[in-house]
């Protein structure tokens, strides 16, 4: 397989810095990423931002049915000329694509080497489409993977750690040095696997309210939980929030970073039915 530099040169292209394009061409790493998905023959998978098709080839080699979603027209042209067997290339935005619709199936797996500036948007898409995504394996900025796989109580634990953790089991699989990419980014990367839990760690009354609750909790990390939560009026009055914390057995002077996904879920349930 040609290197990213060779393929770009052959097509008269350059990596687009503004698009966050850093191409990974190391065969051993690409094979490890594909292996992490544990794909079966004919299993549907959506690859986000396939770029030059390096990971795409390893995904297709498993026998999976790969739908590659790419926004960059230059990359689409490359993928079409490279004509990787078993891969369907679709023009689309990785940050907004409907996975099930583009794959034409109710459940699938997702993979991709994500541009750093789109990481949060894509992870929230996985969260919102969790009923359709059984597993996702992403190459991300190492700092982000450290946060997503962190446990409650530390500085790295944050908003997405708590929200994703309720529905998915996050695993920090391995790190990738920056020099493995072309061009090399300024920071190292890591591979994250998100495996959907058979059931959420704890039930919630309303998933959207749970997300709003966690967002409010982390909006002002240095404040106590009650002072952070009361900033979102849609969650209820101060009195209702105080009562919910008491019902859930959560000390209102704690900070959001100390709460597990289950504890956030307990607060959400204690808020009662959603109005209207």
Image (spheres, rainbow, N blue to C red):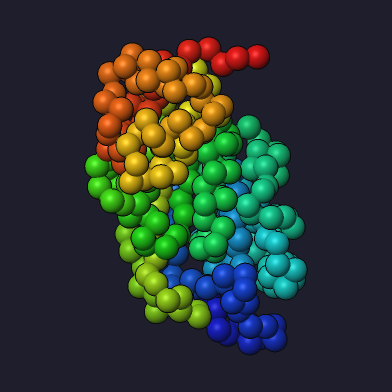
Q: Is residue 131 in sight in this rendering? A: yes
When the figure is inspected, residue 243 is found, relative to residue 115, above or below; the finding is: above
Q: Which of 257 and 35 is in front in this view?
A: 257
- Please name the residue shown 37% across and 55% down the image: 145
Q: Is residue 273 above or below residue 116?
A: above
Rendered location of residue 243, percent (x, y): 38, 15
The reply, left or right, for residue 146 in relation to residue 238 is left
Q: Where is residue 95 in the image (x, y as percent from the top left)?
A: 63, 52
Task: Judge whether residue 39 can be spotted in this image.
Answer: no
In the rendered view of the protein, which quadrant contains the C terminus?
top right
At x 67%, y 47%, the residue is: 97
State the count of labels: 0
274 w.r.t. 210: above or below: above
Q: Nearer the viewer, residue 161 or 47?
A: 161
> What residue is rendered at 39% in x and 34% in y?
227
- Residue 174, percent across and down? 32, 59
Q: Residue at x 63, y 32 (%)?
A: 106
In the rendering, at what x and y percent does residue 252 appear?
30, 27
Q: Which is nearer the eye, 217 or 259? A: 217
């Amino acid at each position: 397989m040609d290197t990213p530099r060779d393929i770009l040169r052959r097509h008269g292209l350059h990596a687009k810095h503004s698009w966050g394009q850093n191409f990974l061409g190391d065969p051993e790493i690409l094979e490890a990423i594909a292996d992490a998905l544990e794909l079966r023959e004919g299993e549907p998978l959506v690859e986000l931002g396939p770029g030059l098709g390096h990971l795409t080839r390893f995904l297709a080699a498993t026998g999976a049915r790969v739908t590659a979603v790419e926004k960059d027209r230059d990359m689409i042209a490359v993928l079409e000329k490279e004509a990787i067997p078993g891969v369907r290339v679709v023009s689309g935005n990785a940050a907004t694509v409907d996975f099930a619709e583009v794959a034409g199936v109710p459940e699938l797996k997702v993979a991709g080497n994500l541009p750093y500036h789109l990481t949060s948007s894509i992870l929230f898409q996985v969260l919102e489409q969790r009923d359709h995504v059984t597993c996702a394996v992403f190459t991300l900025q190492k700092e982000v993977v450290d946060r997503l796989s962190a446990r409650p109580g530390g500085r790295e634990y944050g908003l997405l750690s708590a929200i994703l953790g309720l529905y998915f089991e996050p695993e920090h699989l391995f790190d990738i040095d920056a020099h493995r990419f072309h061009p090399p980014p300024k920071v190292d990367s890591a591979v994250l696997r998100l495996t959907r839990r058979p059931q959420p760690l704890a039930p919630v009354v309303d998933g959207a309210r749970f997300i709003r609750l966690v967002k409010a909790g982390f909006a002002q990390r240095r404040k106590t939980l009650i002072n952070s939560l009361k900033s979102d009026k849609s969650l209820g009055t101060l009195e209702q929030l105080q009562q919910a914390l008491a019902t859930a057995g959560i000390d209102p002077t704690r900070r959001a970073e100390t709460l597990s996904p289950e504890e956030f879920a307990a607060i959400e349930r204690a808020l009662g039915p959603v109005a209207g």
